[in-house]
Amino acid sequence: MLESLLFIIMSLITIACAIGVVFQKNPIYSAVFLIQTMVSLAVLYVLLHAQFVAAVQVMVYAGAIMVIFVFVIMLLNLNKDDLEGDRNKLPLQKPAAIILGLILVVMIGVIMTRTIYQGAQGEYTPEVMDQIGNTQLVGKMLFTKYVLPFEIASILLFAAIVGAIVLAKKQIIKEEK
Amino acid sequence: MVVPLTWYLVLSGILFSIGAVGVLINRNALVIFMCIELMLNAVNLAFVTFSRQQNSMDGQIFVFFIMTVAAAEAVVGLAIIIALFRNKATVNVDDINIMKW
């Protein structure tokens, strides 16, 4: 009972904040709404017995990635035209996009509610997970079964750091010449 | 299980659709990026739900990797937006058409 009440409240907050992200004119408000969306998704992860993912969601998404977003919004010093967004070159764009979105919701909803789950059941039931500990299980799998993807992910992050520095530095090199 | 897992999947579908609509109707490149993050989050929720359904840990590991890719994508994308803003002084995607033939 408490669980379904919590689910309903958190999902309503999530959907409301997601709509806020899309329809706010000022990008800084969109960013704040997106942070709230991610924090309420972390609560849903706890309800699904994925405590490690919930903690990483708050730390990496709401903490790190959104800080970059807010930092860039502040850095860019947008003019009024950018803040107010569309100058309505395509008047039909908004209604058409919303109708297509509703069609997408219906399609995904029909597929999701009619899904028949099949395939082998794993051995990590919530009871087993609570006994061993979710974080310990994630760590064990990361360094045994998924050790190669883990290393590739580290190379990807390294490439992203190098790429960001190169892209952001280009202008300075040009000015020196 | 008190809450049916289908509800989580439907919530994930709704979030994904809101993100897709946001990409379609917004002109600000930063907001479009945030909507892409929203769609990635919706997929993460579906992954965790399926992982719970199958009593398996693999879905949660995949969420971990998706977060890594999302972080890399956000960093490189925002660097591109900063570079564009230096050249064109706008983040409106209608004005960013220098790669159009």
Image (cartoon, coloured by chain):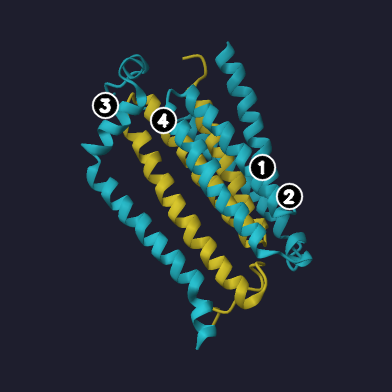
Chain colours: A cyan, B yellow
State left or right for residue A5 relative to residue B2: right
Sooner in the amino-acid sequence: mark 1 or mark 3: 1
Q: How far apart are marks 1 and 3 (CA)?
A: 39 Å
Q: Which residue is drawn at 34% across and 26% down?
A: B54
Q: Residue at x 30, y 22 (%)?
A: A124
Label 1: element kind: helix
Choose between A45 and A101: the one closer to the eye: A45
Which residue is disc 4 drawn over?
A52
Q: Mark 4 lies on which chain?
A: A
Choose between B69 and A165: the one closer to the eye: A165
> Residue A37 location, x and y as percent?
61, 38
- Residue A33 found in image quarter: top right
Choose between A78 and A92: the one closer to the eye: A78
Label 2: element kind: loop
Label 4: element kind: helix
Q: Distance between the residues labelled 2 and 3?
A: 44 Å
Which residue is disc 3 drawn over?
A120
Position of A19 relative to A48 (above/below): below
As drawn, which residue projects farthest toward the top?
A1
Sooner in the amino-acid sequence: mark 4 or mark 1: 1
Label 3: element kind: loop
Which residue is disc 2 drawn over?
A24
Q: Distance between the residues labelled 2 and 4?
A: 31 Å
Q: Can residue B23 be seen in this view?
A: no
Which residue is disc 1 drawn over?
A33
Q: Which of marks 2 and 4 is in front?
A: 4
Q: Distance between the residues labelled 4 and 1?
A: 23 Å
- Residue B61 found in image quarter: top left
Residues beneath discs 1 and 2 located on the same chain = yes
As drawn, which residue projects farthest toward the front?
A176
